[in-house]
Amino acid sequence: MPLLNSIETILSGDFPPVLLIFGEERFMLDEAFDKLISKLIPDEQAKFDYEKLDGNETDYGTVVDACLSYPFVSPKRVVVVNNFEALAGKPSAKENIHTGFDKYLDNPQPTTCLILKADISSLNGISYELGNTRKKAKAEKRLKSLKFPYGKLFEKYDCIEFPKFRDSAYPNWVRNRFEKLNRQVEHDAIELLLAQTNSDLREIDQEIRKVASMVSKEDKITTEDIAHSLGTSHIYNVFELQKAVGRRNLSKSIEIMQKMLENDRHEVLIVTILSRFFTTLWKLEEVIRSNNNQYVIAGAVGINPYFVSEYSDSLRRYKPGEINRAIKMLTAIDEKLKSSSVQPKYLLEEFFVKIVKK
């Protein structure tokens, strides 16, 4: 079963006759797709052999006809079906509606590359499960039980999932993106960027490119550079707020929060980041009892190994009951922000006094 071949492998070798790409991380999927098309359709002339279809508006017969056509000027004809899940899920009273496509998958046109882009929510995370020894057998059973066309696609052809990013994967991804642009970046700068962009890969990538264009190649990118690019103060930001809360510095926490609310409406971001912070402490309290390897700990709680010591220091300052209370209070604050007219400043000040104050 050729499931989960990598995009790099596809690009470096012969293109398969049929390729299914799917997954929750749409930015990565779209980026990989653009690379494929750039390789397959290198110039304007090659576009004569490029056809795009939409699963919402087409049928299997149209797809097969497009695939059976011969290329005009290129070695390969490229047929793309966007939203393939819509086509695969169309109900019909006729059981033979997909007969032609079924036969095509048994004997695909060698001069055609068929790319199927899909959103298959029922298979989200399948690549992780296949790589996990405890879940692999169950995952393989799921794949074998798939109905047409997914069953045959996973059995015979290359299928690549772009799964949802885990929290622990973001820092290295950001660092690698900067390195591809020949830029070095500080650890704290990465954390600030992630805190201010809500872990949206497309938004993060845009900010990476923007800050890289602003800073000389000889200089290491700092928190000040990130803050300047984002239009926020490097002193009064959610990253520094988290540090102050972690150190149980009440006055500093309130000072940063007030400045942030004066400059912009950051209350939702503050609640989001602090909720993630205390949830991480709650997970850490469980994991650290049975393991002292920072890499194992980091993977288990979803943070970069570099910050394990910082979180561990914060954990020593908060009792389990306080962490649990903080999570409950932040959940209540989030609900009040969405459903009442209470000033965010007063809600957050109350939180800091009741939780952060020693």
Image (cartoon, rainbow, N blue to C red):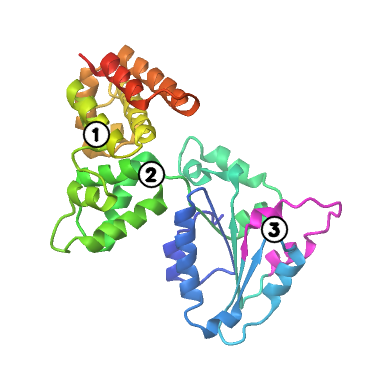
Q: Nearer the viewer, residue 239 or 61?
A: 239
Q: Secondary structure at mark 3?
A: loop
Q: What amino acid is found at the position of numbered circle 1 in the picture?
A: Lys
Q: CA distance from mark 1 to mark 3?
A: 49 Å
Task: Estimate how packed mark 3 is, as few (under 14), some (14 to 19) or many (20 or more) residues with alpha carbons within 10 Å.
Answer: some
Q: Is residue 90 left or right of residue 192?
A: right
> Which image quadrant: the N terminus?
bottom right
Q: Is residue 26 left or right of residue 54?
A: left
Does the stretch in magenta take in 104?
yes
Q: CA distance from mark 3 to mark 2?
A: 30 Å
Residue tagged by mark 1? 259
Residue tagged by mark 3? 56
Q: Which residues are magenta?
A: 81-107
Of labels 1 and 2, the one closer to you: 1
The image shows residue 325 at horizontal and vertical percentages of 36, 15
Q: Residue at x 35, y 21 (%)?
A: 347
| Residue lying furthest right | 93
Q: What amino acid is found at the position of numbered circle 2 in the picture?
A: Ser
Q: Secondary structure at mark 2?
A: loop
Residue tagged by mark 2? 199
| Residue lying furthest left | 218
Q: What amino acid is found at the position of numbered circle 3 in the picture?
A: Asn
Q: Nearer the viewer, residue 152 or 345?
A: 345
Does the stretch in magenta take in 198?
no
